[in-house]
Image (cartoon, helix red, strand yellow):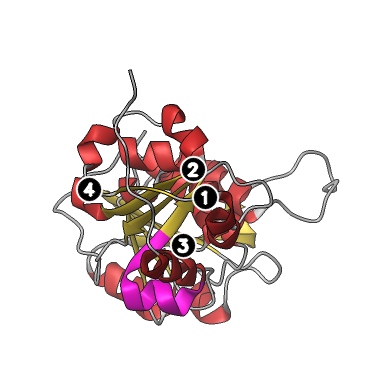
Amino acid sequence: MKGPIYPPLSKAMLSRLVKLGQKKHRDIEGMFLAEGVRTVSELLDGLPDPGLLQALVLEEHAVARMSGLKRFKGKVFIADADSFSRLAQTTTPQGVCAAFRKQSVARFQPASGRSFVVALDDVQDPGNVGTIIRTAAWFGADAVICGEGTADPYNAKSVRSSAGSIHAIRILSVPSIAKELQRLQGEGFMVTAASLDGSDYRSFDDWPLRRALVIGNEANGISPDVLELADRLLLIPHAGSEPAVESLNASVSAGILMAGLSFV
């Protein structure tokens, strides 16, 4: 018995989706692309609102690999290999691609009581950004706030690295991370920043109910204006008298500190 027959992707829709590979078009459309069986499946499984899916594009051989397609009636399309060669942003596409509506979070407003947020100050590697988003969702952060210079969280590599967690946590971008952190301080947040000049993050036992963790640029660390306003500078200590490597990867540092600062 044959399954449902899905319509072919139109040339107009293909052209529209291909443009989402560029940030300016993602911003204009308010949409982003996700690619691959795992990433798309996790996004679909965790979708808070089915209306956030704009289009699910599959090669015929990939239809059987996707489950629950009945939920998205009218939004599933078939495309050939040539179309996927234009859509795909990986070297070995799996024949699965989806366009989703981006979150519309203009301002982070914490709920009353305790809250934990992660702020990214000029984190330029989209892989790090995506990994931090996924880790922040794991540790129950309320939001990831992206400051100036930080890679677009809806970049294809960021989306892949977040492995389907984009809709699991609030994500927003701000023009000035320093001003946003000052606003949060006014809301009762303690701003903490990862720094080689800080104190062992394990040495603190008096944490307020509202905490913001800042992760800085991979090469240069946190910007001076953010360091100046930080309430605490946190250091992840190394083994031995001298470190065997220069520094930790930004997403690894973020994960270690989130484990220490979150409410888990």
Task: Find disc 3 in the rendering and name its residue.
Answer: 153
Picture coordinates of residue 158 (x, y %)? 53, 56
The amino acid type, in three-letter code, at marker 1 is Asp
Extent of the magenta region: 22-32
Which numbered disc covers residue 74? 4
**Residue visible at 82% across and 48% down in the picture:** 243
Mark 1 touches mark 4? (CB < 8 Å) = no
**Farthest residue in the front direction?**
1
Q: Are marks 2 and 1 in contact (CB under 8 Å)?
A: yes
- Rendered residue at 17%/49% (across/down): 113
**What is the secondary structure assignment of the residue under circle 3?**
loop
Distance Cα–Cα, label 2 vs label 1 = 6 Å
Q: Which quadrant of the view contains residue 149?
A: bottom right
Name the dominant secondary structure of the magenta segment. helix
In the picture, the disc for residue 80 is 1
Q: Nearer the viewer, residue 248 or 233?
A: 248
